[in-house]
Structures are given as C-alpha cells and as structure tokens.
Image (cartoon, helix red, strand yellow):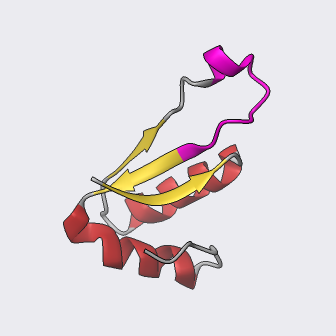
Amino acid sequence: MKELLRTNDLTLIAFARALLSGEGIDCFAMDVHMSALEGSIGILPRRLMVREDDLSRARRVLLDNGFELEET
C-alpha cells in the first residue's frame, strides 16, 4: 500500500474516500484510532492508502477534484 493523502481534516478523508470509491479504487484509512492517544484534539494526521497499482489513477482522481497532493 502507498500513501495517497495525509491530513488532519476528517472531511477531506471522507471526500477522498467517496471519490475513490466512485471510481472503483479501493482505499484504506490509517491512523483513525490515534485520537484516543492524542485526547481527541486532532493533531495527528490520518493517512489514506491505496494499492501501488492504483496510485497514479487515484492521484489523478483527487487532483481533478481540487486536492493538493504532495509530490511522490
């Protein structure tokens, strides 16, 4: 699995997952339970992972929908 997106914004994760699901791209959100360690204040970013084979297509989907992604 490769990291596609890293953010503290839960709405971006939800939106990205919906977009990827609509394109038939499987994704997995990591670090979603870290809030228990941080006291639920949202300082630790969550990561959205995709299969390596889907990475370029997933990046294109998010970029086409206004996401700003880090270069890999």
Left or right: 24 in relation to 60: left
- Residue at position x 44%, y 82% from top? 60
The part of the chain drawn in magenta is: 35-46
Q: Which residue lies furthest to the left in this view?
A: 53
Left or right: 28 in relation to 43: left
Residue 18 image position (x, y, % from top left): 50, 56
Number of marks in the rendered image: 0
Indicate the quadrant where residue 12 lies: bottom right
Q: Which residue lies furthest to the front in this view?
A: 72
Left or right: 64 in relation to 12: left
11 or 71, nearer to the observer: 71
Residue 66 image position (x, y, % from top left): 65, 79
- Image position of 61 with respect to 36: above or below: below
34 or 21, nearer to the observer: 34
Q: Which residue lies furthest to the right in this view?
A: 41
Based on the picture, tell me whether residue 41 belongs to the magenta stretch.
yes
- Residue at position x 39%, y 71% from top? 58
Residue 64 image position (x, y, % from top left): 55, 84
Indicate the quadrant where residue 43 lies: top right
Left or right: 38 in relation to 21: right
65 or 45, nearer to the observer: 45
41 or 12, nearer to the observer: 41
- Residue at position x 53%, y 31% from top? 32
Based on the picture, tell me whether residue 33 belongs to the magenta stretch.
no
- Residue at position x 58%, y 25% from top? 34
Residue 63 image position (x, y, % from top left): 55, 80
Query: Is the C terminus in the top left, top right, bottom left or bottom right quadrant?
Result: bottom left
